[in-house]
Image: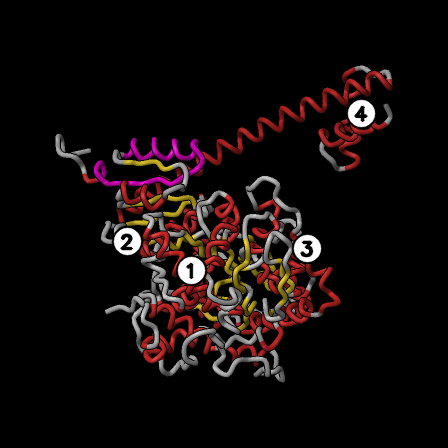
Amino acid sequence: MTGRDAKLRIGFIPLADAAALIVAADRGFTAAEGLDVELVREVSWSNVRDKLNIGLFDAAHLIAPIAIASSLGIGHVKVPIIAPFGLGVNGNAITVSPALYAAIKAEADGDILDPMVSARALKRVVERRKAKGEEPLALGMTFPFSTHNYHIRFWMAAGGVDPDEDVRLVVLPPPYMVDSLASGHVDGFCVGAPWNSVAVDLGIGVILHFVCEILERAMEKLLAVRAGWAEENPDVLLRLVRAHRKAAAFIEDEANREEVAAILSAPNRIDVASILAVPNRPDVAAEVIRRTLDGRMKVAPDGTVRTDKRYLLVGRDRAARPDARQTAWLYAQMVRWGQAPLSQELLAVAKGVVRPDLYDAALPGQETSSANEPADGIGAFAGPKFDASDIAGHLAHWPIKRTLG
Amino acid sequence: MTNGSRTTPDAALKILVIEEDPVRSAILEAGLREAGFLNVTLLGNATGLLEQVYRADPEVILIGLENPSRDVLEQMFQVSRIVRRPIAMFVDQSDASTTAAAIDAGVSAYIVDGLKKERMKHILDLCISRFNAFSRLQDELDRAKSALEARKVIDRAKGILMKLKNLSEEEAYALLRKTAMNEKRKIADVAQSVITAAELLK
């Protein structure tokens, strides 16, 4: 494919970190690069992955671990995927029902805002339930190969909770999280924005932690394409990166917040009310998305607000330039939880999913590092610093794990 | 069925259909039975999916492509020690036309490792043709419905014109048709405008 007006179909899930995709297409940044983009909203990550893999989509909004799993050929067909652009860093949160929040708070031996205090308190809640013969807690996450799965596991395991034995982790597509918490199907979940805020606004959830309190920097969504497609369309790919970099900068400019929130909450984008099944659904998509971008989060139904500028990074602090330390960390979690064996070859594949070289080729002269990054690129709240060249050492630190063989 | 009293392999093959729409689900079941697949379980909603899949112990799972429970199924195959591990039909990309047709029809299938590819293709082709026939029926029904609606709108507009402009029924219809042609619009749309205008002027 060469020349102008390349036609592209791009799949996405209604989440705040699809912002750069949506703004790039709906505010003309892709058109300015000669790209005619059709955005297709999907309900499940399986669909996004399959349609990208078989070529129905040219590119997709993808959780980083699915891109890695697809490239490694674990859990599904092996299709090498690459990502020259990061759509978002951070943005997830752990939300629990008011009842579970109260139970954790009652067991806390310190400030519940400290993830170690809350994780240890969860451990005591779990033990108490077990002693009383109650059902294990059910917690939602989005996909077996998802940041949400690894984030919620990392947090609870640090406090001594075995995610496979002590609780029940269930997969729920993001738009179904809130309905499931409302119906009592789950006691809490880890999901991206705006779904945590929607649960808070409905009075059925309390945000326990922003994931950026658990990991300072966590790669979240990628702009993913098939490696084969990238080879055949090198010029289109670079134009795609440039359009998205401009969209990301537009989103991060606070002067544009109102407009961005309106673009994102439009019909067929992230119009929360049309997606939810719960009664009295709030028609506050623009408001909720705005709070997410500002990092000014209402965390409890009583109106308590917590602010964290790092809540979701879209292009700020070098967030759009994908980082191989992040894919290495995610691969380490796959090994920790028994989804993949540990090998240097697989690690190299995982690191190769991200292509900062293509980002740099599209955007010469852009920043390649940021002063706001933790030394190891991750900044976990517990455990040793992450070293991609010593994943065995990283895993040895953790008593709770499911490593293969 | 060629083996007389012996059950054919197709008859015994355990197929689980996960489909919320009862019509789609019934059409598929009838199609599978006609083709000799007698061991078909239907699952209408996703509550307790794991338990239900465990109980059915299927060799083939058919599920709508747009069904969000697909993500739930995939986790089941990842983590569960009690469910055998089916793999997605899309794994086999050698048959691009079947894959494309399946996606068009909105079907996805998961099969347990080791199931013969030809048998699976047979089942999938069957689903595709049934689902396509279903959506054709649906389209026809929708068209018939909207034709009926249009008829009603045109009749009302004719009545308004006859009364206001003192026209015969034929003249009223001719006026609507001429206006539609001049404005490159559908007669029903023009008729709707007449009704709206009449409501406003009441």
Could you tell whether B99 is left or right of B197 in the image?
left
SS at mark 1? helix
Q: Find disc 2 in the rendering and name its residue.
A: B85
Q: Looking at the magenta stretch, what is its main secondary structure?
A: helix
Q: Quadrant of the C terminus of chain B?
A: top right
Nearest to N terminus: mark 1 or mark 3:
1
Q: Find disc 1 in the rendering and name its residue.
A: A122
In the rendered image, residue A182 lying in the magenta stretch gets the answer no
Outermost residue on the left side: it is: B5
Q: Are marks 1 and 3 in contact (CB under 8 Å)?
A: no
SS at mark 2? loop
Please provide percent x and percent y for residue A332: 37, 73
Nearest to N terminus: mark 4 or mark 2:
2
**Amino acid type indicated by mark 1:** Leu
Cα–Cα span, label 2 and label 1: 32 Å
Image point (34%, 33%), residue name: B29
Please provide percent x and percent y for residue A280: 62, 41
**Amino acid type indicated by mark 2:** Arg
Task: Indicate the chain on which mark 2 is placed.
Answer: B
Question: What span is in magenta?
Answer: B10-35
- Crowding around mark 1 (Cα neighbors within 10 Å: few <14, some 14 to 19, many 20+) is many
